[in-house]
Amino acid sequence: MPRIRGSRAGRRRRTAVVAVLVTGSAMLTGPDPAAAGGAPPSPPAVPRLDWSRCVPGSAFDCATAKAPLDHDDPGGRTIELAVVRRKATDPERRVGTLFFNPGGPGGPGTVQMPQNYTSFPQEVRERFDIVSWDPRGVGSSTAVNCFASPAESADWNASHPAGFPVGEKERAAFTASYEELGRRCERRDPELLRHVSTADTARDLDLLLAAVGEDRLTYLGISYGTMLGATYANLFPDKVRAMILDGNWDPRAWTNDASDEDPRLTSFQRLGSDRGAAETLEEFLTLCGAATTDRCAFSAGSPQATRAKFEELMVRLRKQPVHGWTYAGTVAAAVNGFYVVHPGWTRLAATLQDLWQGRAPAPAPLPPPPAVPEPDPYLGEERATAVFCGDSPHPRDPAAHHPLEELSAARAGDVGRFWVWSSGGCATWPAVADHRYRGPWDRPTARPVLVVGTTYDPSTPFSGARAMAAELADARLLTLRGHGHTALLNPSSCVRAHESRYLVDGTLPPPGATCEQDTPPFGAPRPSGGVSTGGGGTAGALS
């Protein structure tokens, strides 16, 4: 799940939406001591996890694991990984450990797993210890931090426009701001910047798997977590017990098809995020217009009239912000609001209606903080940027982004502009990861992978799920006919039942299986029911 730049007032709310030994012919960049005539490095020591309650009275346990900064140099500098666990609630029927990555890059698992714990299927909570962690560079782990104080970070945030730049002056300010960020980060810890790649984190995951005493991985990754899962599956194919990838990134698009040429498009254009957001916006306006104002406050009485109303609001905001809400900041807030349908779409409609009437929108209430030591960690832009820009190829000429913005605007409208500039800071980022996994993606895994895709996803379009299922050697696609970013955050009883059966006993959905969301946007809940075929997840556990 990419980092969203919205209105200034909305930045803290983003956290609430939610966030190795190389074998075979893996295309992992960097030196290979064995190929150079030296002995291969010894494997890193398995970390020791000394679990204790995260805070008094918490249902979650916390621990810290040590890992090498460079897995090819296990005797060198070490880093710390913050880890969280919720033990199986039915220990007598416990199957094992489910590892969870909440996406990003930059999602702090020690916060987002506890925050979203009840979104996991009940049987999964009963039968698995659920473990997550803050990936290297992020959250409470050894983190990329480019500022000496929160005030410095706030000053930097104020140096560039919210959402995305509009006009030549703002584009120049945006470029200068991210050039400064890169200089700051390079001065403070250039070595760390080169070792926060997806492949580095996949190797950390393999160490954590050993640390919990298991030799095969059960995993659920959402959004960017699908890239992490696919990377792990191809670095360690024999260790895959069960893997769910929900809200998928196309691995070839992410790596620019492993090309060393300067890419023609930004990562999010290659992934199709602009088109996915445009399709979701169209659905939002259509369904809102078909609803009454008590269900969708922004409704103008018909889909056509509601689309015209939105377009007029964007024109108004371009000319004059409303209580600090700019055109670009509002577009970013809209994309952010699409992620979680309930209550996100209703709140977004109310925000747009307030702006239409010239009122300052009320801030969305924050969820209660999870019972962990750092429930509201610093999520500076540099953390996601370090992973994203160092791992995925981007155009290196800042001047190229305005033409690319116009290209996306032509195919995706206002939201296309947002997605182009979401990675605009990568043009001047100073570091490239030493170890980037760039394929192949079709190494046969010990067990098949379950790929879940939502038909109207504003960040990871359904085309990404199709691509992931096609690229992996053995995968089954489960389609969620619905809206929002990932099935985990937009519940479907049907998807949960399929996932439970797959995680417990390895039963895949039938080919071509589709599910519906429990509650459509602006509508009444659908009757809940079971899956279409087969027995329940209470069958014998997959070993």
Image (tube, helix red, strand yellow):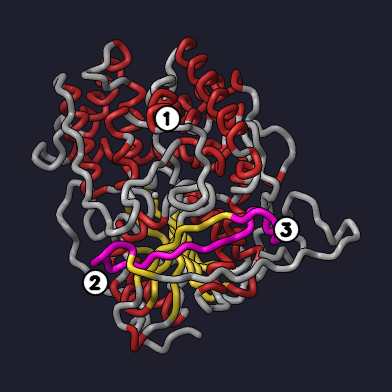
Frontmost of labels 2 and 3 is: 3
Q: Is residue 461 visible?
A: no
At a point 16% along the width and 32% down the height, the residue shown is 362
- Classify mark 3: helix, strand or loop: loop
At a point 51% along the width and 46% down the height, the residue shown is 143
Q: Return the disc, 2 or 3, that comes first in the chain's sequence.
A: 3
Report how far apart the C-alphas of labels 1 and 3 lie in the structure: 33 Å
Report how far apart the C-alphas of labels 1 and 2 lie in the structure: 48 Å
Percent x, y of residue 32: 81, 56
Q: Is residue 200 above or below residue 402?
A: below
Residue underneath mark 1: 153
Range of residues picked out in magenta: 54-78
Residue underneath mark 3: 72
Residue underneath mark 2: 529
Viewer-closest of 311 and 209: 209
Q: Type of residue at label 1?
A: Ser
Q: Type of residue at label 2?
A: Gly
**Quarter assignment of residue 280:** top left
Percent x, y of residue 121: 31, 70
Q: Is residue 38 above or below residue 94?
A: above
